[in-house]
Each structure stands twice: as C-alpha cells, then as structure tokens.
Image: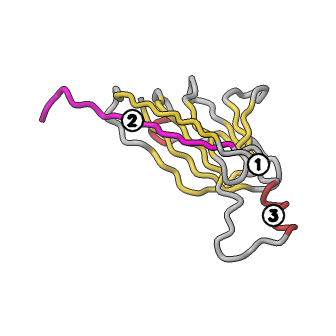
C-alpha cells in the first residue's frame, strides 16, 4: 500500500438564481482537501427533532475535528400525494434552527427541503430544534 495516499473530501455546489423575465445566473463552489484522519464519515438518517433544544449525537466523532457537517431538513417532501394548502403551510413552518453555543444567541435556519453545510469550530455542542412542532432531519459528518 502506498503510504502517500490520503483520504480526500471533495465538495461541489451549483446554485441558480433567476430574476423574473431574465436568464438564470449561476455560481459554482468547488474544493477538495486531503483528510488527516482515516475515520469513516458518519451518516445519521432521518430522525425527529422537536421544539426543545437537542444536542446532536455525532457518535464517535463527538470529540473529533470536522471537515464538514451537513444537516438536511427532510420536511417538505410529498412523494405520494399533492399536498393541500394547509399541509403545505404546516410543512413550510417546520424550520430547523441550529446553534453552536449553549446560550443559542447566534443561530442558523434550515428551511424545509433545504440543507446547511459548514465546519463548526467545535463538535462538543451542536444544538438543533424545530421552530414549529417536529421536523425530520438527517446529518452527515466528515472527519478532518
């Protein structure tokens, strides 16, 4: 085995913005980094959060340095039916709030069907809650 080979993480995002009556504009973000760790990325599939602040359980990565944390708000996906206006309004209210400090002074919002990607400076306190009832989320964690 070649000892010079390292685990690698590549991030690619492609976004569009279209002003009414205009052609869409796009922007791309792409980067790739070698990882210092041989740890396996952690994926926690759909689970529920309530309106009470909850500390995220990042399994064995709880005390590791992270290259990337991705939180996906799984709400707003209607696979088998066309939602009524009431169902759509209820789903759209299930915004997930994320905080990296116990006082929750500075927070990020993840709207239904959207995701947030970032690299927190600590994984010892990543808190989440739903602003309205319960929301289903998934998390993906890539170690440094």
Q: Residue furthest left?
A: 1
- Label for residue 9? 2
Q: Is residue 3 magenta?
A: yes
Magenta segment boundaries in residue numbering: 1-17
- Name which residue lies at 63% across and 45% down: 115
Q: CA distance from mark 3 to mark 1?
A: 27 Å
The number of callouts visible is 3
Are discs 1 and 2 less than 8 Å apart at CB?
no
- Name which residue lies at 82% across and 67% down: 87
Quarter of the image for the C terminus: give it: top left
Quarter of the image for the N terminus: give it: top left
Question: Where is 51 relative to 121, above or below?
Answer: below
- Name which residue lies at 71% across and 76% down: 81
Question: Where is 15 relative to 46, above or below?
Answer: above
Question: Where is 32 relative to 77, above or below?
Answer: above
Mark 1 Cα within 10 Å, few/some/many (few <14, many 20+)?
A: few
Mark 2 Cα within 10 Å, few/some/many (few <14, many 20+)?
A: some
Mark 3 Cα within 10 Å, few/some/many (few <14, many 20+)?
A: some
Mark 2 and mark 3 lie on one chain; the one further toward the N terminus is 2
Residue with the mark numbered 1: 21
In the image, taking residue 113 as reference, residue 61 lies left or right, namely left
Residue with the mark numbered 3: 88
Helix, strand or loop at mark 3: helix
Mark 3 and mark 1 lie on one chain; the one further toward the N terminus is 1
- Label for residue 113? none
Residue 38 location (% of width, % of height): 31, 34
Q: Is residue 125 magenta?
A: no
In the image, taking residue 33 as reference, residue 12 lies left or right, namely right
Helix, strand or loop at mark 2: strand
Which is more toward the observer, 139 or 52? 139
């Amino acid at each position: 085995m070649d000892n010079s080979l390292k685990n690698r993480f590549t991030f690619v995002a492609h976004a569009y913005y279209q002003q009414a009556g205009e052609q869409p504009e796009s922007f791309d973000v792409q980067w790739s980094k070698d990882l210092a760790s041989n740890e396996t990325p952690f994926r926690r599939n759909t689970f529920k959060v309530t309106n009470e602040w909850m500390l995220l359980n990042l399994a064995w990565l709880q005390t590791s340095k992270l290259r990337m944390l991705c939180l996906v708000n799984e709400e707003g996906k209607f696979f088998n039916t066309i939602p009524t206006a009431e169902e759509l309004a209820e789903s759209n209210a299930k915004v997930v709030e994320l905080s990296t400090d116990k006082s929750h002074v500075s927070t990020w919002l993840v709207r239904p069907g959207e995701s947030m990607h970032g690299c927190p400076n600590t994984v010892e306190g990543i808190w989440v809650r739903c602003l309205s009832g319960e929301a289903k989320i998934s998390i993906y964690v890539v170690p440094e």
